[in-house]
Image (cartoon, rainbow, N blue to C red):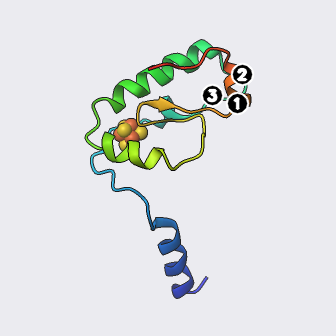
Amino acid sequence: MNESGTEALLVRILTNQPRLSGAACVGRSEVFDPAETGEDPDDVRYRHEVAASICRTCPALNSCRDWAETERASGSVIAERARYTRRKAASIQQPVLF
Ligand code: SF4
């Protein structure tokens, strides 16, 4: 890819991305990530509760919440909530409530 192509790609990727200065989740993806195939639902709930507690200390929470409303359900915890697709919610059986 030439430089202008790279630049155009970066502009496309980064446009409208939130500024999440001080994001408390940096380096903590292991607790924010979606459930892995076969992962014990209790373990998922525990991880996601830990993630939500991290979000509650995050200086970027309000900006992140605004951005999260525009995102599709991924099963990750974003802005102290985990949003699941219907299929994933059914496999977890008990929704994560914060
Ligand atoms: S609110 Fe949570 S998901 Fe959003 S930036 Fe902060 S720690 Fe990360």
Q: Which mark is residue 78?
A: none
How far apart are the alpha carbons under marks 1 and 2? Answer: 6 Å
The part of the image, by quadrant, that contains residue 94 is top right
Mark 2 vs ligand 1: CB below 8 Å: no
Mark 2: which secondary structure?
helix
Where ligand 1 lies, by quadrant? top left
Tag in front: 3 or 2: 2
Residue at 62%, 32% (x, y): give it: 84
The residue tagged 3 is: 35
Q: Which mark is residue 90?
A: 2
Q: Amino acid at mark 1?
A: Arg
| Residue placed most toward the observer, 1 or 74 | 74
Considering only order in the chain, which callout, 3 or 1, is on the residue closer to the N terminus? 3
Q: Residues within 10 Å of mark 3 (few under 14, many from 20)?
A: many
Q: Are marks 1 and 2 in contact (CB under 8 Å)?
A: yes
Q: Position of residue 18 (x, y in %)?
A: 38, 56
Q: Position of residue 60 (x, y in %)?
A: 30, 44
Tag in front: 1 or 3: 1
Q: Which mark is residue 86?
A: 1
Mark 1: which secondary structure?
helix
| Residue 27 makes an appearance in the image | no
Which quadrant does the C terminus fall into?
A: top left
| Residue 53 makes an appearance in the image | yes
Mark 3: which secondary structure?
loop
Which quadrant does the N terminus fall into?
A: bottom right
Residue at 43%, 28% (x, y): give it: 51
Q: Amino acid at mark 2?
A: Ala
Q: Position of residue 32 (x, y in %)?
A: 49, 33
Considering only order in the chain, which callout, 2 or 3, is on the residue closer to the N terminus? 3
Q: Amino acid at mark 3?
A: Ala
The part of the image, by quadrant, that contains residue 38 is top right
Q: Is residue 87 left or right of residue 28?
A: right
